[in-house]
Image (cartoon, rainbow, N blue to C red):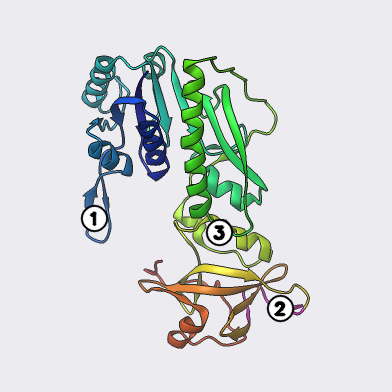
Amino acid sequence: MNIVFAGTPEFARVALQALVQAGFSVPLVLTQPDRPAGRGLKLQASPVKQYALEQGMAVEQPRSLRLDGKFPDDAARAQAALRSVRADVMVVAAYGLILPQWVLDLPPLGCLNIHASLLPRWRGAAPIHRAIEAGDAQTGVTIMQMDAGLDTGDMLLSEAMDILPTDTTASLHDRLAEQGGRLIVQALAQLQGVGLTRVPQPAEGVTYAHKIDKAESSVDWTQSAEAIGRHIRALTPFPGASTTLEGEFIKLISYEIDSLSRFANKRCGQILSVSPEGITVACGEGALRLTALQRAGGKRLAAADFVRGFPLSVGMVLGQPASAGGGG
C-alpha cells in the first residue's frame, strides 16, 4: 500500500514514524512551508519535514492546494507530485492546509485523518487544549474518512483516553500522539484486510475547538480556582497562562488548589499568603497556590526562588492592567 502523508507538527511526526516502523511505503510527504522560529527568527523546517528528509522521503511544501487560489503554481506542483506517486490513500494529521475536493478524490481509498478528540466533540484546530480547559474526563483519537467539511467525515476507528488531573496540553499531546500513530497503523492494516466500517458522526454533541489565541493567556481571577487551574494546564506549554502585577506580565507555570474554606470575602486576585511552598491567590471560588512562575524574559522558577527576585506581599492584587509593551 502506497501512502501519501500530510502533516506538520510533532503530533504528525509521531504518526509518520509509526507508519514507517510498521513497514508502510510513504513515497511523498506534504508539510507546511518552513517558518521563522526562535530568537533569531531563522527559517525552521517542521518536525514532519525533518523526519521525512532523514528517511529519504520526497517532500513538498505548497502554500496552498487550491488550483484557483493565491498560489496556483504551488498547487499545480503538488498535484503533479501526488499523481506521480499513485498513492492508494492519504493520511492526514494536523497538516494545517484545507484539502480541496481534487485532493480528497485523488487516492482510491480517500484521505484518512488522525484527529485528537472523540468526535463529534471538539472538531477544529485545538481539541487537546479545549478538552482540558472544559474539564472533560476523557478525550481520545478518532480516525476519520475526510470529506469537505471541518472534521465532519465518517468515523472509522476511535479510542478513548482518560485526562489526568495533572495533565497539561503538553503531556496529553504526547500520549495522544502515540495513540494516534498506533490507531492509524491499525486502521490501514484493517483497510488492507477485512476493511473498515464507516460510521456517520452523530448530530448531537458537536463542539468546536477554536484555535488558541495569545489573547486568551490572561487569567480571569473571578473564575473558580478549578477553572483557572484548567486554564493554566490547557495553555501549557503554549501560549502559557499569565497575569499581571505592578505593570509586569507573569507567566503561571504550575499550581495547587488550596483549601476552599480558609479564605472568605477576599478580593479576586488578591495575594493571601506567601511562603516557600507557593503564593496563594484568591479566586472567584476557592484559592490557588502558585508553585512555579516566570517573569517576562526570565527563567521558570519555583515560588521560593521567584519571590527572592520579585518581592510579593499579602494584599497585593494580581491581574491589574499591565503597562504598554509588556509581554510573556
How far apart are the alpha carbons under marks 2 and 3?
A: 25 Å
In reply to whether residue 267 is colored magenta, the answer given is yes
- Mark 3: amino acid: Arg
Q: Nearer the viewer, mark 3 or mark 1?
A: 3
Identify the secondary structure beneath mark 3: helix
Identify the secondary structure beneath mark 2: loop
Q: Camera-side residue: 2 or 305?
A: 2
The part of the image, by quadrant, that contains residue 49 is: top left
Q: Kindly identify which residue carries mark 1.
A: 41
Nearest to N terminus: mark 3 or mark 1:
1
Question: Residue 232's spot in the image, x, y percent?
Answer: 55, 61
Label 1 Cα neighbours within 10 Å, binned few <14 / some 14-19 / many ≥20? few
Q: Nearer the viewer, mark 1 or mark 2?
A: 1
Q: Residue at x 40, y 41 (%)?
A: 14
Q: Main secondary structure of the magenta part?
A: loop
Q: Kindly identify which residue carries mark 2.
A: 266
Range of residues picked out in magenta: 262-272
- Numbered tag placed on residue 233 in the rendering: 3
Label 2 Cα neighbours within 10 Å, binned few <14 / some 14-19 / many ≥20? some
Q: Are marks 1 and 2 in contact (CB under 8 Å)?
A: no
The part of the image, by quadrant, that contains residue 122 is: top right
Question: Is 90 above or below relative to 272?
Answer: above
